[in-house]
Image (tube, grey):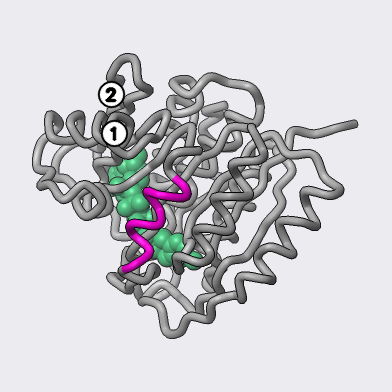
Amino acid sequence: MKPFTAITIAGSDSGGGAGIQADIKTFEEWEVYGMSVLTSLTAQNTTGVQDIHHVPVSFIEAQLGSIEEDLPMNVIKSGMVATKEAAKVVGNWIARQHIPYVCDPVMVSASGHPLMEEETRAALSEYLFPHASVVTPNIPEAETLLDMEIKTEEDMEEAARKFVDRLGAKGALVKGGHLNGEAVDVLYDGGIIRTYREDRISTENTHGTGCTYASAIAANLAMGRTLPFAVEYAKNYITEAIRHSFDIGSGSGPTNHWAHRKERVR
Ligand SMILES: Nc1ncnc2c1ncn2[C@@H]1O[C@H](COP(=O)(O)OP(=O)(O)OP(=O)(O)O)[C@@H](O)[C@H]1O
Ligand SMILES: Cc1ncc(COP(=O)(O)O)c(N)n1
């Protein structure tokens, strides 16, 4: 049997809620075989990030090479890429793969800790976005990367268009988790604007939602679904993961990657 496969290029979260751990857990739930390239290791829990160790760029390259030499890949997902050197190596490698690529431009943890060096911002636009089937910024990330304020759904639409028209991504999903009211996300794929809307769930336990959502989109692309359908399935999945999130740790608890088994959203 040959499964669909996905590779995540991201940081490790020792607390298991975000980063590589969230990505692999999500791939598994979609029955997509997960592979990983670690860019940084974080000492992290639900209260915050206590320490960060960046993997040497030569070792990031070694991991990419080991996978490329031997294993099939249906999709690439990236998360924490902290330095411009890492962004360059990762971007140049992705450019050669010619498969769908989901780029989650992780900048700051939900607990407020910077996960990317400031000078890496420009490197994301230069090396990663041009290869992305979709970039998945949250509101603060979109505001920083585009240097604009986002307060309304119309602003989200404008931002999504700018990621495509100005920064060269093929698609952009601007996530509205940080706005008040409904949990609305706006997708622009270079053609039309689509809106994904769910009621807001009252919980503090949203650690890792961004990583989990992007990985669910990637898993659906690996299975051959189109981007709009991949986002629709992933939105249902993340909503249930938040609804049944775990009240563990004394900070913002993690989402529940197996919640969909109760709700049968697949
Ligand atoms: N309280 C909530 N109830 C329902 N959906 C939510 C809630 N918070 C976030 N979402 C949804 O979760 C997904 C992730 O969005 P968000 O904007 O929180 O991303 P993020 O900031 O990258 O995540 P993280 O919390 O991991 O930093 C989006 O679909 C968003 O609409
Ligand atoms: C290694 C790593 N990657 C990504 C995130 C973002 O996730 P969140 O915004 O939920 O903290 C994180 N906290 N840690």
Question: In the picture provided, is 170 more to the left or to the right than 118?
Answer: right
Amino acid, disc 2: Thr
Q: Residue at x 47, y 45 (%)?
A: 103
Q: Residue at x 56, y 46 (%)?
A: 77
Question: In the picture provided, is 147 more to the left or to the right than 82?
Answer: left
Asked if 92 appears above or below 155 in the picture, the reply is: below
Amino acid, disc 1: Asp
Tell whether position 232 is magenta. no
Residue 56: x, y in percent? Answer: 61, 76
Count the labels in the image: 2
Secondary structure under tag 2 reads: strand
Residue 154: x, y in percent? Answer: 12, 29
Residue 140, by quadrant, is: bottom left
Whether label 1 lies within 8 Å of ligand 1 gets the answer yes
Q: Which residues are magenta?
A: 119-128
| Image quadrant in which the C terminus is located | top right
Residue topped by disc 1: 185
Asked if 97 appears above or below 40 in the picture, the reply is: above
Residue 219: x, y in percent? Answer: 60, 36
Residue topped by disc 2: 195
Which one is in front, 144 or 136? 144
Which numbered disc flags the more N-terminal residue, 2 or 1?
1
Which one is in front, 228 or 256? 228
Asked if 145 appears above or below 266 in the picture, the reply is: below
- Magenta segment main secondary structure: helix
Question: In the picture provided, is 175 more to the left or to the right than 21?
Answer: left
Q: Which mark is residue 177?
A: none
Q: Residue furthest bottom?
A: 51
Residue 93: x, y in percent? Answer: 63, 49
Asked if residue 193 shows in the view, the reply is: yes
